[in-house]
Amino acid sequence: MAQAKSDEREAFWESYGPLDCSPAALWRASIYEARHLAALRLERLRLTKPEAVRESYEAMTKILTELG
């Protein structure tokens, strides 16, 4: 998400440096994405949005498949 916009975030990435694209870093990023999706699912449940909850299963399946 931090890479999605090119506003003041560009200054952050210039200071932070390039992303680590090693296998371990990519695996860790997938874990964080899965955690984010799980939090979204809980929020969608809280808001009583069953259709949005169903959509989250496809996204989570994709990430979990990538994790192997």
Image (cartoon, rainbow, N blue to C red):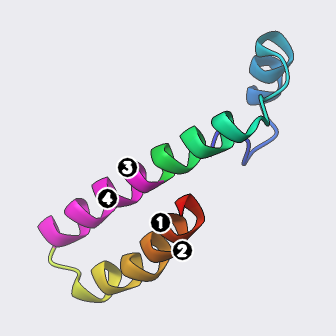
Dot 1 falls on a residue whose secondary structure is helix
Dot placed on the residue nearer the N-terminal end, 3 or 2? 3
Q: Which residue is mark 3?
A: 35
For mark 3, give the secondary structure: helix
Query: Alpha-carbon distance for marks 4 and 1?
Result: 12 Å
Q: Which residue is mark 1?
A: 64
Vertical arrangement, residue 9 with respect to residue 31, above or below: above
What residue appears at the point 72 percent right and 41 percent down from the top-left corner?
23
**Residue 42 placement: quadrant:** bottom left
Question: What range of the chain is rendered magenta?
Answer: 34-47
Q: Kindly identify the amino acid type of the residue bearing the numbered disc 4.
A: Ala
Kindly report the distance in space between the C-alpha atoms of the residues bearing marks 3 and 1. Answer: 11 Å
Which numbered disc flags the more N-terminal residue, 2 or 4?
4
Q: Residues within 10 Å of mark 2 (few under 14, many from 20)?
A: few
Residue 2 in magenta stretch? no
- Gap in angstroms between the C-alphas marked 3 and 2: 13 Å
The residue wearing badge 4 is: 38
Local packing at callout 4 (Cα closer than 10 Å; few below 14, some 14-19, many 20+) is some
Residues tagged 1 and 2 counted as in contact (Cβ below 8 A): yes
- The picture places residue 63, in percent across and down from the top left corner, at 53, 65
What amino acid does circle 2 point to?
Lys
Residue 13 x, y percent position in the rendering: 79, 22
- In the image: residue 63, left or right of residue 25: left
